Amino acid sequence: MDPPAPPKLDDRTRALLARAERRVAGRDANQEIDRERTRQRIAYGRSLSYEVVMGPQHGFAYLATVVAPKLAEYMRNKKMSAYNCRGVFVSLFVGADLYLIEAPTFFDAVREAEGLDEAGWRVRVAAWERLG
């Protein structure tokens, strides 16, 4: 069976994926996520993976308007914050590949795409955390 064709990605999604810590084959996901958990734990004293499957119908808007708020809520429920999220990473499945993206990098990409300064970003995150 042939691997799935790579999805067509918008520019912002491609830019985010270019900032990933690593790109690996999706078939190796369990091993690679475990490896990243260990790396995060050593570097930051904690480790949390947030797994997301990006379907062919999804683009960066999905990541910014659905995934980012849910990630912020998930972190709040874990007694963490999107402001201080070292040790948290997004395991983003895109087609046959897995991209490991540190949460600060993920949130920075969303903030930049939204054109928010630090104050605007704090307002946005606070709103997401209140909704949860």
Image: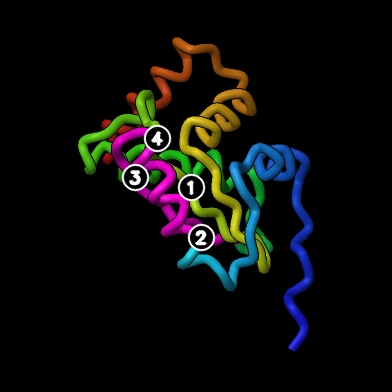
Q: Amino acid at mark 4?
A: Ala
Relative depth, front residue between 96 and 125: 96
Query: Where is mark 1, residue-wise?
Result: 90
Q: Earlier in the sequence, mark 2 or mark 3?
A: 2
The CA distance from mark 2 to mark 3 is: 13 Å
Query: Where is mark 3, residue-wise?
Result: 47
Q: Are marks 1 and 4 in contact (CB under 8 Å)?
A: no
Residue 32 has which mark?
2
Between tags 1 and 3, which lies in front? 3
- Write down the region rendered in magenta: 32-54
Q: Residues within 10 Å of mark 4 (few under 14, many from 20)?
A: few
Q: Judging from the image, what secondary structure is the residue with disc 3 in? A: loop
Q: Earlier in the sequence, mark 1 or mark 3?
A: 3
Q: Residues within 10 Å of mark 1 (few under 14, many from 20)?
A: many
Q: Earlier in the sequence, mark 1 or mark 4?
A: 4
The CA distance from mark 3 to mark 4 is: 9 Å
As drawn, 28 above or below 124: below
Q: Judging from the image, what secondary structure is the residue with disc 4 in? A: helix
Between tags 2 and 1, which lies in front? 2
Query: Where is mark 4, residue-wise?
Result: 43
Quadrant holding the N terminus = bottom right
Q: Looking at the image, which residue is at 31% across and 45% down? A: 74
Q: Earlier in the sequence, mark 2 or mark 4?
A: 2
The CA distance from mark 1 to mark 4 is: 16 Å
